[in-house]
Image: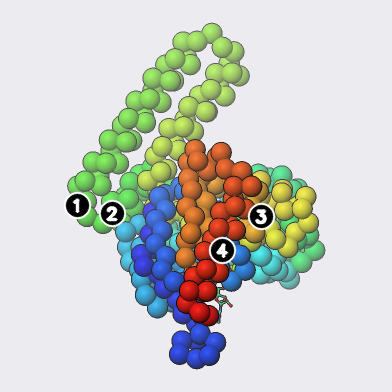
Amino acid sequence: MIELKGIRKVFNPGTSSETVAINNVNLKLESGDFITVIGGNGAGKSTLLNIVSGSYEADEGLILLNNNDVSRLPEFKRAPYFGRVFQDPMMGTAGDMTVLENLSLAFRRGMRRSLFRWSCHTQDKEFFIEQLKTLGLGLENRLNEKVGLLSGGQRQALTLLMATIRREPSHHMIRRDYVRFYDGDKKLAKDEFDKAFKEAKEEFKKRKAEIKSSNASKEEKKAQLKEAFEKFDKKVRVFDLTKPVLLLDEHTAALDPKTAAKVLEITDEIVKKNSLTTIMITHNMKDAIKYGNRLIMMSKGNIVVDINGEEKKKLTIEQLLEMFNQASNDMLSDSAILGD
Ligand SMILES: Nc1ncnc2c1ncn2[C@@H]1O[C@H](COP(=O)(O)OP(=O)(O)O)[C@@H](O)[C@H]1O
Ligand SMILES: [Mg+2]
């Protein structure tokens, strides 16, 4: 869960170039929310992400991560909790290092997120290969190549992986951290976890019995069991507080349309597979509608549109454009009234 309360950011205050980049933003994301952000140039989108990640400090307001106030936490201390991908493919990876070296670096950084719980294992390489395979770009065959030789799209996909890679904690570890970071009565946290765990496990057991007694083939049964376990596992992982929050700032804008579409698909898969809380800025309204479960539009440092669930699914580009024009008109009439 991540919550922004009364965020305000003014650049160059008291000078002729004073800019209110963020006026007053309140936003609450539940764990696993995938939110897309649109808005015109200078609307404050990038500034907002920079404030969340700690690159900029807000002048006013609070940022809560799993109920903990991180507003005053310096960027390097916040870094383990966030994975970022920027527009420029050169930024997220080291071009003169190999694919494997880049991943190892990111993996070690990711471990801080999890309180040093994992030491480096020799099977890391196997794990990296497995992860690279999921991208479907053949990078698992190019482990020792310099990243500088890869295309922009391949680099962005690798950056996405680096921003999110980590070894999955066990159910036991998830429970421990959930209780540890819970803001309030720890007994409640334990009970909440245990109840959900029990329910998920009961359901899994029931399904397992069903599968075993069915007359499906051995292969089919195996696949069904795997699916049932994954469902159970996913329900437990909802409680995992040490997952990174993914922050994407127009990360496909520098790619050709076909590559951009592929990288977006990869993004969606990674987000879904790990149920990551995600904020994705895009200038593409179609993508903003297609991806995620919630959409916000920013204008002049404010959130002017906030749509989620079914309503978002039904949204059309025409409607969105209409809202965009409306927001711009409101802005114009505001400035007409204010006389600037
Ligand atoms: N480091 C900075 N110094 C001064 N002004 C800035 C800085 N970063 C952003 N701004 C200004 O803040 C406003 C919002 O910028 P930004 O968040 O980059 O918008 P967006 O990403 O929506 O295009 C713009 O007017 C921009 O010029
Ligand atoms: Mg921007």
Q: Which residue is mark 4?
A: 329
Q: Does label 2 point to a residue whose CB lies under 8 Å from ligand 1?
A: no
Q: Which residue is mark 3?
A: 284
Q: Earlier in the sequence, mark 3 or mark 2?
A: 2
Q: Are marks 1 and 3 in contact (CB under 8 Å)?
A: no
Mark drawn on residue 182:
2
| Nearer to us: label 2 or label 4 | 4
Q: Who is closer to the viewer here, 326 or 300?
A: 326
Circle 1 residues within 10 Å: few <14, some 14–19, many ≥20: few
Instruction: Please tell me which residue is depicted at 22% across the width and 51% down the height of the picture.
Output: 186
Q: Amino acid at mark 4?
A: Asn
The percent position of residue 48, horizontal first and vertical second, equals 49, 68
Instruction: Please tell me which residue is depicted at 59% across the width and 47% down the height of the picture.
Output: 319
The percent position of residue 275, horizontal first and vertical second, equals 49, 45
Q: Tell me the quarter of the picture where residue 170 sits.
A: top left
Instruction: Please tell me which residue is depicted at 69% across the width and 51% down the height of the picture.
Output: 263
Q: Tell me the quarter of the picture where residue 152 sits.
A: bottom right
Q: Earlier in the sequence, mark 2 or mark 4?
A: 2
Circle 4 residues within 10 Å: few <14, some 14–19, many ≥20: few
